[in-house]
Amino acid sequence: MSVFTDQRHRMLAIATAITCITVVGIGLSLSVPLLSFVLEARGVSGTMIGINTAMSGVATIMLAPFIPNIAARMGTRRLLISALVLGAAVFISFYYAGPFWLWFPLRFLFGVSLCVLFVLSEFWINAAAPEGSRGLVMGIYASCLSVGFAIGPTVLTIFPPTSMTPYVIGAVLFLLSIIPVALAGQLMPSIDHTPSNQVLLYLAAAPSAVLAAFIFGAVETGGMSFLPLYGLRNGYSEASAALLVSILALGNVLVQIPMGLISDRVDRRKLLLTLGAVGFVGAAAMPFAAQHAFALFPIVAIWGGLVAGLYTVGLAHLGAQFRGSQLAGANATFVMMYSLGLLAGPPAMGLGMDIWNPHGLPLTIALLFLLYVVVVAWRIATGRSASQKVTVENP
């Protein structure tokens, strides 16, 4: 792993990694609505669009545990650049893909590209972050990524999905990300030996952080999918119901940096426990506020921002617990668990709404947080001290 010889090199490495992943975030957030619009215009059913979209998550779950091993053999920078080239090629290929069946391998390959980018970029940022301000760095990273996610869909307000322009813009964004990676040189950490790819070992070593990724993935995706429906079923107009998602995203952006600062000054496991408890209380309170916009909107904003802290604090906790190649393995597990949450959350919350319409949505979310709180509380009561580093041995 590279040694950062001075503070300037360390800050440059962090800035380079964040720049790379933010540009990718813009391209990713452009791709999701773009591809959905195109498939719907072709007459593809909503179910099949959802299954096709899920192929990216399937790719992440299958590939993530093996990325550190591949990077150890191939080199982190070479693998990162290869993933960016693959992402650009697949993005432009969607425009020319005729038969619908072809979109499944393309989505899978797109998921492969994104999985490599997120695992290695987060490993890079976490490895470069100073111990005393790791949470702040991860907060800045999460905020920049959220801004990138917000920018992408605006492209479709200028260029129609039927034109080639959005595809070209998406591909160019991936290719532009190669520039900071190529210029990074020795600022990118290497993986000196093959780490363990045993997901359960990382889950057992740092369950508070790893499960935080799963819970956030489930709640973020499920919340963004069903909050507008929740608003509609509680009598809100379409515009007001859609605004719930914007408010959720706004809270996400505003809270990440303060949350990172706090995590640098407290036991991160206890902070994760607190965030889980807030997630439970906020979700459980929604049915009581659902009929009153003046109450529901602030709850969603504050609740959404604090819940998003699970990702920031969880990443920072991993960086404090693992080192070197094992940090790469832990980051891969983190991204994989987020993707598992992304796949599991929407079906669970949809089922909850079917069982109890409409309040099954917040109560399903509350149940997820309650289970997380129980696990983290048990871990704190029975686990090692927060300052003790974890070593996961190769099998």
Image (cartoon, rainbow, N blue to C red):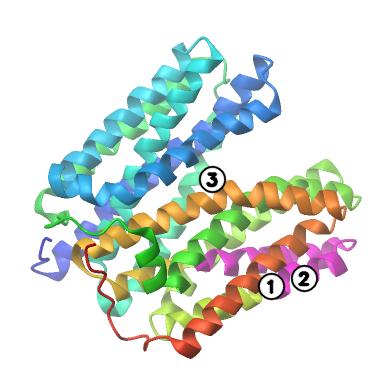
**In front here: 52 or 301?**
52
**Is residue 307 visible in the rendered structure shown here?**
yes
Q: Which residue is denoted by mark 1 in the rendering?
A: 280
The residue at 9%/53% (across/down) is 186
Q: CA distance from mark 1 to mark 2?
A: 6 Å
Q: Is residue 173 left or right of residue 107?
A: left
Q: Please, what secondary structure does the residue beneath circle 3 have?
A: helix
Q: Which residue is denoted by mark 3 in the rendering?
A: 150
Q: Where is 179 relative to 102, above or below?
A: below
Q: Please, what secondary structure does the residue beneath circle 1 have?
A: helix
Q: At label 3, which amino acid type do we have?
A: Ala
How many neighbours does mark 2 have within 10 angstroms: few (below 14), some (14-19), or many (20 or more)?
some
Determine the image quadrant of residue 6.
bottom left
Q: Which residues are magenta?
A: 281-310
**In front here: 125 or 283?**
283
Determine the image quadrant of residue 180.
top left
Q: Which residue is denoted by mark 2 in the rendering?
A: 284
Q: Is residue 199 left or right of residue 36?
A: left
